Image (cartoon, rainbow, N blue to C red):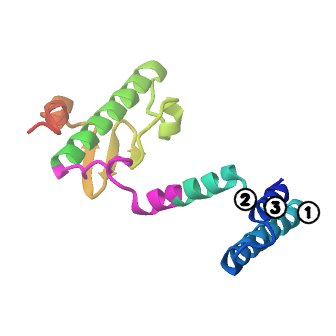
């Protein structure tokens, strides 16, 4: 179709066209021919293009890796602040108190102290050790550096103190 346009323009200019017009016409023909050759070569050899989905997944992967490495605060919640010594102490006192209650209930039902805490059939918080004598027991507890001992002869309300209030007020300004 472009070649037909060139022929028409040659006929329109005629044989007596100026050399400048002839050179311009010749250059135009060369451009059209080279463009047609390039298109036919492209049609013969299919282009190897990366699918857009693969490029998108690659970008998403890079952004995800960057987010995991940098862990921005707007995406990841920061870890909670470390608990104070008072909160750790109160938590341990409550755990020892609850365990002592279970041991006392076990003795009331079975008529003897349990040999181990596993006999209580209850989940015992970690860090609590139990020793039983003939009629008394001792519970030792450790909670991240806070160590306490509760004997069966100790007053439970005095041992517990204000532990529940301390836990209820944690995090309040």
Q: Residue furthest right?
A: 44
Q: Residues within 10 Å of mark 2 (few under 14, many from 20)?
A: few
At which x and y percent is residue 16? 77, 73
At which x and y percent is residue 27? 73, 75
- Label 2 sits on residue: 50
Q: Name the magenta segment's main secondary structure.
A: loop
Kindly check if marks 3 and 1 are in contact, taking CB atoms under 8 A apart as contact. Answer: no
At which x and y percent is residue 82? 25, 52
Residue 148, which numbered label?
none
Q: Nearer the viewer, mark 2 or mark 1?
A: 1
| Depth order, front residue of 151/170 | 170
**How far is the residue under mark 3 from the one under mark 2?**
47 Å
What's the residue at 33%, 38% (across, down)?
Answer: 136
The magenta segment is: 63-85
**How far is the residue under mark 2 from the one under mark 1?**
19 Å
- Label 1 sits on residue: 44
- Label 3 sits on residue: 11
Give the answer, above or below, for where 106 lies relative to 58.
above
What's the residue at 12%, 36% (across, down)?
Answer: 172
Give the answer, above or below, for where 106 lies relative to 64.
above
| Depth order, front residue of 45/14 | 14
Q: Residue furthest top?
A: 109
- Secondary element at image label 3: helix
**How far is the residue under mark 3 from the one under mark 1?**
34 Å
């Amino acid at each position: 179709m472009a070649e037909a346009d060139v022929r028409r323009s040659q006929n329109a200019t005629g044989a007596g066209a100026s050399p400048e017009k002839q050179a311009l016409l010749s250059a135009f023909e060369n451009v059209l021919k080279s463009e047609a050759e390039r298109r036919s070569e492209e049609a013969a050899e299919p282009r190897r293009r990366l699918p857009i989905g693969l490029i998108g997944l690659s970008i998403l992967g890079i952004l995800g890796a960057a987010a995991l490495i940098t862990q921005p605060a707007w995406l990841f919640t920061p870890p909670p602040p470390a608990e104070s010594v008072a909160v750790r102490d109160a938590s341990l006192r409550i755990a020892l108190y609850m365990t002592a209650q279970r041991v006392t209930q076990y003795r009331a039902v079975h008529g003897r102290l349990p040999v181990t805490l596993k006999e209580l059939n209850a989940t015992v918080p970690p860090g609590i050790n139990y020793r039983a004598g003939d009629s008394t027991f001792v519970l030792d507890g450790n909670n991240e550096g806070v160590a306490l001992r509760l004997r069966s002869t100790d007053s439970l309300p005095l041992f517990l103190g204000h532990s529940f209030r301390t836990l209820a007020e944690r995090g309040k300004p």
